[in-house]
Amino acid sequence: MKEFEISCPLTREPRLKEIEAKAGGLQWVAVKRSVDARKEPVWRYRYEAYAPGEYQPYTLAGYKDVRDADPVVVVGAGPAGMFAALKLLMLGLKPLILERGKDVHARKYDMAKLSQTGQVDPDSNYCYGEGGAGAFSDGKLYTRSSKRGDIREVLQQLVNFGASKDILIDAHPHIGSDKLPVVVENIRKCIVAHGGEYHFESKVVAIDGQAGSFSAVCADGRVYKGKSVILATGHSARDIYEMLSARKGALEAKGFALGVRVEHPQEKINWAQYHGTWKPGVPAAEYSFVEQQDGRGVFSFCMCPGGILVPSSTEAGTIVLNGMSNSARSGKFANAGVVVQIEPEDVPGDDPFRLMDFQHSVEKKMFDYCAAFNPENPMTAPAQRMEDFCLGKISKKMPETSYHPGVISAPLHELLPPMVADRLRKVFPRVKIRNYYTNAALLLGVESRTSSPMRIPRNPDTLQYLSIPGLYPCGEGAGYSGGIVSSAMDGIRCAEAVFNASY
């Protein structure tokens, strides 16, 4: 096998004759595509060339019919839960998926209501429902978690269920919030067709039993039984932590990150990243940065080129923001979270809930400030221009924003915790992206759901909860992943652990 690279303009694909010439008569396979904007922006493709019979394409194991197989309860239908269920099918076990929210299409109506009127459904919103928090946040698939498993199993299944084949080779793959619902629905159809079960609006309020015989009790009294339970409830399910705490289960405070959502006109990011050479047909530019300030990381997070900002609260009386973009990334604005790392030692005490309480207090403070102005929509967000924030000035006039509920000029430099505000004020002016530091950029509060501020400790070898053998904490809500792919990979690992413990 040999490797070679080919560059071509961003407005077209590589020429077949050039690829064949580079391959030298060998079988060639594209393995990576990325944008190189150091000079004239180009696509840079990397290929592998194989001698006849040498190349072995990646193949997935088949799904088994599990109608009469042993059941495993999977709590949560986000990436961790869905991919745990798919792996259970491969292993011959029957997944019973219990999701507190609605299916991926029905939940759209509750999200629309949240954005238009500010009415929060605590069980159906941008965080809860089929597909989880990632289903409507662009579907970014970039991860550094390759050591946790084979990423190809996740990406290939997404392609099989409707995602573009581009995600198999793109350096920063994404699906798009417009395409993800169909992918998620196709995953459900596959699981049901092979004998698995989905139960929506099934909020689990108790888990009883022990390894080999568990009962998951839902809020409406329904009970589902399984030999094991995979707990994949996402990063915002405080009620699950409280349920475990009531059983004297072990819980740990875990570091997370908190900050603001930053929105620029997309044309400014395009101009900076492409050095003024962007033109129609060229991908919308992305950015990322990591800085160290006063002993803590300050970094961009969940960057959405051509995207919009959305309300992501899971309870009334709080303001939380997130970003999303469709597959074309063709919107007028670019947004990203810019956040500061918060560690357990930054919040006094030893209560495992203390970082989650801290998170909640900031979300409530943002809401209370806006509520004092009696806005028509309680999801109105506090906002401030970037330079004004760094100078400690109230912004007199707000620029246009993609955030549908609207914004109120606010002193974010005072509303944010000092440990966050002070670091952001020092970092923004030195971000190494031309014209990033500008009053054309709007900061909105608050970006707080970057990951879970709690961890459900598990045995590193068996992946079972330390306090309840046979229960497998999984994904972001358990504190073991961040993002779609790493959560999916953790779900796969937990499904394998269930199988290995029983068969």
Image (tube, grey):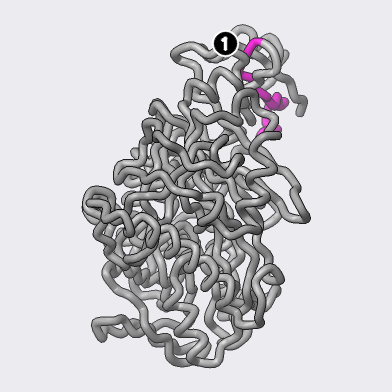
Image coordinates of residue 503 in percent, x first then y, are: 57, 78
Q: Is residue 334 on the magenta stretch? A: no
Q: What are the residue bounds of the magenta stretch? A: 40-55
Choose top left, top right, bottom left or bottom right for residue 67. Answer: bottom left
Q: Quadrant location of the N terminus?
A: top right
Query: Where does the image place residue 279, in percent across and percent down from the top left?
Result: 49, 11
Residue drawn at (53%, 14%) of the image: 278
The residue drawn where x is 48% and y is 53% is 446
- Between 313 and 108, the one lying in front of the other is 313
Mark 1 neighbour density, 10 Å: few (under 14) some (14–19) many (20 or more): some
Visible residue check, residue 503: no
What kind of element bears circle 1?
loop
Residue with the mark numbered 1: 277
For residue 49: magenta?
A: yes
Picture quadrant of residue 272: top right
Q: How many labels does the image show?
A: 1
> In front here: 296 or 460?
296
> At x 48% / y 68%, what residue is drawn?
361
Location of residue 200 with respect to 324 vertically, above or below: below
Is 468 left, or right, of 111 in this rendering? right
- Identity, as a three-letter code, of the amino acid under mark 1: Thr
Name the quadrant containing residue 194.
bottom left
Image height check: is 491 above or below 3?
Answer: below
Residue 243: percent from left, percent from top: 45, 84
- Residue 405 is left or right of residue 364, and the answer is left
- Residue found at x 57% / y 9%: 15
> In front: 351, or 107?
351
Query: Eyeballing the image, is 348 above or below 372?
Result: below
